[in-house]
Image: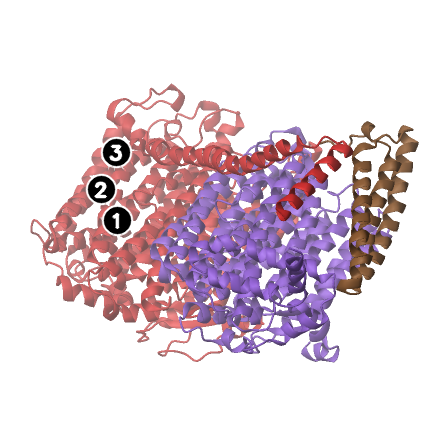
Amino acid sequence: MLAEALVLSAILFVIGTFGVLIRRNAIIMFLCVELQLNAVNLSFVALSRYLGIEGQIFVFFVMTVAAAEAAVGLAIIISIFRHYETVNVDNFNLLKW
Amino acid sequence: MTALIDAIAYDSWILHALIWLPLVGIAGVLLISEEKVKEFAFGWTAGLFVLSLGLWWAFDPAGSLFQLTSETPWIELWGVSYALGIDGISLFMILLTTFTMPVAILGAFKYIGERRRAFYALMLLLQTGIVGVFASMDLFLFYIFFELTLVPMYFIVGVWGGERRIYAAVKFFLYTALGSLLMLVGILYLWFQAQAAGAPASFHYLDLVGTPLSLTEQIWLFSAFALAFAIKVPLFPFHTWLPDAHVEAPTPGSVVLAAVLLKLGAYGFIRFVLPFFPDAAVHSTVVMIMLSLGVVGIIYAAWVAAVQPDAKKLVAYTSVAHMGFVVLGIFTVTVNGLQGGLFVMISHGISTGALFLLLGMLYERRHTRLIADFGGLARVAPLMATAFVITALASIGLPGTSGFVGEFLALVGTFEKYPVIAFLGATGVIFAAYYMLPMVQKILFNKLEREENRTMKDLSSREVAVLSPLLILMVVLGVFPTPVLDRMEPGVQAIVQYVDDGARVGPLQEVVRSGEVGPAPADAVWVEEVPPSHEGQAQMLGVGAGLSAPDDAGAGAEARTSMWLGVARNEGPVRRGGDFTGDEG
Amino acid sequence: MSGTVLLNTALGAQEAVGGFDPFLPGLILLLPLLGFAINGALALKAGTRGAAAVRAGSPEPDTTGGDRPATHTLPTWIGPGVMLGAFLLTLVNFVGMFGVELTEPVIRSYWTWMATGALTVEAAIQLDQLSLIMMMVITGVGFLIHVFSVGYMKEDPGYPRYFAYLNLFVFFMLTLVMGANFPMMFVGWEGVGLCSYLLIGFWFQDREKADAGKKAFIVNRVGDFGLLMAMFILFAIFGTLDYQAIFSAAPDALVYGGGAATAIALFLLLGAVGKSAQVPLYVWLPDAMAGPTPVSALIHAATMVTAGVYLVARASVLFALAPVGAAAVATIGAITALFAATIALKQYDIKKVLAYSTVSQLGFMFMGVGVGAYAAGVFHLMTHAFFKALLFLGAGAVIHSMHHALHSTHKEWDAQDMRNMGGLKRFMPVTWITMWVATLAIAGIWPFAGFFSKDEIIWYVGTSAPASVLYTILWGMAIATALLTAFYMTRMMVMTFHGPNRTGQAEAVHLHESPLTMTVPLGILAVLSVFGGWVNVPGSVRESFFGGFGLLPMSDWLDRWLEPVTASADAVRLEQLGAYASTAPVGGGHVMWGAIATGLALAVVLIGARLVSGREIRPAHESEPDTGFGKVLHDKWYVDEFYDRFIVQPILGLSRACWRWIDQVLIDGTVNAVGSVSRGVGWFGSLFQTGQIGTYAFILTLGALVVLGVLIL
């Protein structure tokens, strides 16, 4: 049972990773990050059965942080969109020195 | 006076008040209008000064070494406490600070034209930091205050400064921050070392004094601390940030910088470096290096000062020369030397502060700092000229002024042990005249040639009010220095006896709290109550301490290094994390 | 706190020592200080008023006419007034000390000045025979000069400031001689230097004058450095800086001729050399003539410059214990005396002649105290104070008059150049006569004061000869100097007062005798210049013709008066070197050499007067510059140029090099280089910063994969 859960988690994580790497739309990249987080959550829950309750507690932490992140991240994306009228990350290189 | 002090339990709250009331004042500064803020800031700091005057009576020179002490646990996990207390040395440093602040603010009422609220808020923040440094009995607390002083000064120079203010501010910040980071490493090493020796985790000064350290360790730690303080003092050749900072800083910034901030370094030497690393501090090579740097500073800075075209820069270099006397006095570790060094600090604070105020007043009138732009001012500004001459004379140590007492005692103390150094240092007396008198002449005397100078105004009544207490102090301290010397003497005696005497006995040893041997109670707290979020910090501590290990590589102290790394690693939740990854592997 | 203590004690609350009860000694110090405070406040007020006028662009407010403001009338009374008070108090104490067996000084301690560790320095004054003699000279001559200044400085806008400085000077000078320990003396020592600085640069708008003041202060500080070092050594050896403790312990604590004693003596000598303008630090004194002339009389002739002599006399035991130090004192004195006398031969500025003459006479005093004749040195100090103050004041009167005369037609001539004077005796008879008295005194002609004091010094130098051949040489130098002195002083008098007047027809009518405030002090000093020498006529001389066969009173009075002060030094000297010889190096007794000296001096005066008046002198602007050796003398042996070239300029150059190269290039270069390197590394790292989120994510993943791979494999 654990093995299946972990494999699923790995698959989800890899999908999320590739999504972040390949896609250029900020919203999609954002959703992929969420996917990664939830993949990790899944493995936390699965492992908690063997290693103790802390795993499940961590899932709540992750969810809280993810919610906060979503709020801030989406806000940033919206304000970027208002300014540039696009959410294609290739157009943004303000972070460049 | 004593009765009044007892009646209001002055002892119990004054230090806290002096540290935190400036912060309360910031709230006021931010609420008040831009026009009124300078009066408010002056009133607030002046009130604090009046409050602090009670310390003169509250501190009993015949009483115990540290007085007005208080201690509240703060971060019990690491043994950090909010511990305050003063001895005779810090007493005068605090008084000097509370005195300088209102003077600096009043002296620059016109100088600060824009963003006044921010400026005065930063000045008050600076006061909190400085008083905190002098009143802290806990090294962690001390370090926080020490670093806190950097931030407001950085902005004061960087925002209200002259043309090259950004360069000066960044140089000032990086230079001093570099030194103090090394000191942080040293503090942590000391902390771990004290625990390795069986003491409970504590950053309290009196717990850390007497921590057993090998000579090699002492010399390394000495270097780390000394670098931080030497930059702050500043000691040749770490002084080049000072002229830049002084020249660019606005008048009140320069005044506070010269009068108080430089003293943090010398104070650190006396309070921490000497008692913590006594063997290193009397090690002949170390002493010769420090004394030589002090003497070179005295002569070299005097020479360099003499050829400065910029009056403010000249005075900045004279600070280096004066602080050379302080370093001489400190590292001879004699009562006379230390007393002299401390007295030079007080006297330099007053006279150099006054010089910067005067130069600021000149700048307000003429918008130049170049000596060559002045001349003949004594003709149109006799009051200013009188103040200037008196201040200059106090600065070069004319007997009867405060400058003489300090330099004389410092050199007497030096001569007792190192006659040649004293001989070289005493030539500073000649060179002091060599840098100061030409400037006095070129600014005040000679022909009144320029039209702008001819119409210059003399001191206003506000400026007279700013300068007269300084001038009076210069003379009074020069004629009656004994009350000050008497109050500093017990603290100085304690340090000299503790450091100079190989047996490490004396008043300081008596007040040092003996650490319990065996498993310390703090360790138990560590295991039981540590919340998860502390894990990272604990590890960081371990890493921080580990970083200093290479410093110690030559010391053959590897075993000890791993041992104190173990303090962080082998106990509590940190180990659990380690086990987990181990299983996975 | 201390103010009340000060007053209480000043009022003489303590018990008397040795039967001598000093009368308000603290008040002697307080009076001039009080004068300074009041005059200083008035000066600030007057200065502020003057400043307002300058700002408004109007000329100086008139303070010379009938309606002088209070700031200019009050100092007339306060300045000399406090001096008179101090003089009378000193006189009371002086008389009180007569006939009292006082072997130890009376000490009054007012408060503890500095106390740390083993060092305790009391703010204490001491009264003994030496300090009282000095106080008499300072307050007495000082009072006369204050009075003279009332007339001399009357028209100066800085009148109150002048008196403030002058009072402050007297305060510090009294502190110097009354201090009961070395640091107290040092307060006075540097304090008088400060006042000298302020008074030399009194007319600070003149750059040269301000420069002269600065030079005096800096050169003096070289000497002060020596004094500081001496104090450090004394403290290290004796653990105290009190005179009494040191001097009584010295014969036991210091080895005769040992390194410590020699070092102390030489450092003290450095201090004395600086203050008393001896070779090689004499250069400031001639420049100091930039100050008002009464200042030159008081500070740079009568009192301050003699502080070095006082110091040697005060620390006589220390010098007696260090024969090398004492010999150095005498040698420096002799060299200075001769050297300065040669320069004085060729000066045309009347004040410069007197300045070099002062340097020369100070050399005599040094010779005296250097060979252990402390009383003789102090004796010459005293008589010199009388006649040199008189000479300076006389010169001041001349300059004052010349200045008025030249000013009346706006003639751009130097009022101090003797070539522009001549024949002044017709216009200023009182000045003329009194100055001749002083000239005869300084030339060493019987029975004027200088004869006795100078003769005594030469005699003691000569009779020291058995100790070393050095003293024979010094003796020869001293006699040569005495003759040169007679010549250049005669030259000065003749050029100034005799022959035809060269000032010019229109100007000469404005030449005038000075007002009473100026001539009365001249008269009093002239009397002192005649009789002042009679206080210490040696026994043998007194019995001879020169003593009127015993008619002169007070034989050896000063020797006996100062005996308690110099006793221990005399004892050391007697033990180590034996008594003075009874004849001069080439034979002959005291009386014979006295006769030879005065005869020779008289001859030089007469011949000199004839020589100089025979010469044709033209006004300064028509004169041709000196040539050959005369030019070397006129240009003062080029010592100033030498110092400038080999000391001042190198230090300045070194200072600039330190700043430009060490500070800016080496140290700051390193600091900035550290900054630049950090920036460079940062810039290099930032090249990896594409700004593309995708790139970052890709590299992140790649990194994670690598780490995972490493862990797994």
SS at badge 2: helix
Choose the circle earlier in sequence order: 3 or 1.
1
Q: Position of residue B227 (x, y in %)?
A: 52, 51
Q: Which residue is mark 1?
A: C364
Q: Position of residue B93 (x, y in %)?
A: 60, 61
Q: Mark 1: which amino acid?
A: Phe
The chain letter for the residue carrying disc 1 is: C
Chain A shade in the render: brown
Residue C2 as seen in the image, left or right of residue B158 = left
Q: Could you classify mark 3 by the number of other residues whose Cα lies within 10 Å: few (under 14), some (14-19), or many (20 or more)?
A: many
Chain B shade in the render: purple
Q: Which residue is mark 2?
A: C481
Q: Are marks 2 and 1 in contact (CB under 8 Å)?
A: yes
Residue B562 as seen in the image, left or right of residue C304 = right
Q: Mark 3: which amino acid?
A: Ala
Q: Can residue C596 be seen here?
A: yes
Q: Which residue is mark 3?
A: C609
Name the residue located 35 percent from the left edge and 21 percent from the top edge. C623
- As drawn, C557 above or below C412: below
Q: Nearer the viewer, residue C107 or B192?
A: B192
